[in-house]
Image (cartoon, grey):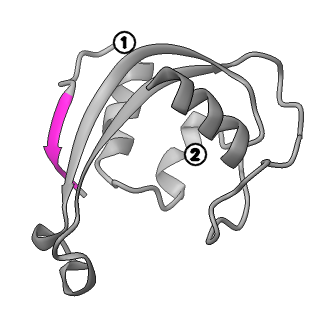
Amino acid sequence: MHNALLRECMEEVGEEVEIGELLHIREYIGKNHVHSSFDFHVHQVEYYFVCYLVKEKNNKAPTNPDSHQVGVEWIHINDLFQFRIYPKELREYIIQHVNHQKSPVYLGDIN
């Protein structure tokens, strides 16, 4: 899992990271959410880790971005709620982590 995360960060963000603790596990069960008409049969489990940049942003282009990816943007934590981030509820948990507040590891089927 760690090797996959390291690879994905290079491919989709263009940055080398150091992997920290597992912060959250989230499930997505498509039939329970707004896009159920086209992802009714989707059930995925996502793992969210704390990661640190190995070097300050090197501005390398991602080596293999997702086909629908339009870019990478680094935002300040204070601006987190000004951006569309999915799952939306994850923003609250990120802020809790930054503020050294405990939050559950398993988040369940949130969107």
At label 2, counting other C-alpha atoms closer than 10 Å, the crowd grade (few under 14, some 14-19, many 20 or more) is few
At label 1, counting other C-alpha atoms closer than 10 Å, the crowd grade (few under 14, some 14-19, many 20 or more) is few
* Residues at marks 2 and 1, CA–CA distance in whole angstroms: 18 Å
Image location (x, y in percent) of residue 52: 63, 18
Q: What residue is rendered at 54% in x and 16% in y?
A: 19
Point out the tag, 2 or 1, that comes first from the N-terminus: 2
Give the answer, above or below, for where 38 lies relative to 13: below
* Range covered by the magenta-colored residues: 106-110
Q: Which residue is mark 2?
A: 79
Image location (x, y in percent) of residue 9: 65, 36
Image location (x, y in percent) of residue 33: 17, 71
Q: What residue is rendered at 47% in x and 51% in y?
A: 81
Q: Is residue 63 left or right of residue 52?
A: right
The amino acid type, in three-letter code, at marker 2 is Asp
Residue 108 among magenta residues: yes
Which image quarter is the C terminus in?
bottom left
Q: Which residue is mark 1?
A: 100
Q: What residue is rendered at 27% in x and 84% in y?
A: 38
Secondary structure of the magenta portion, mostly?
strand
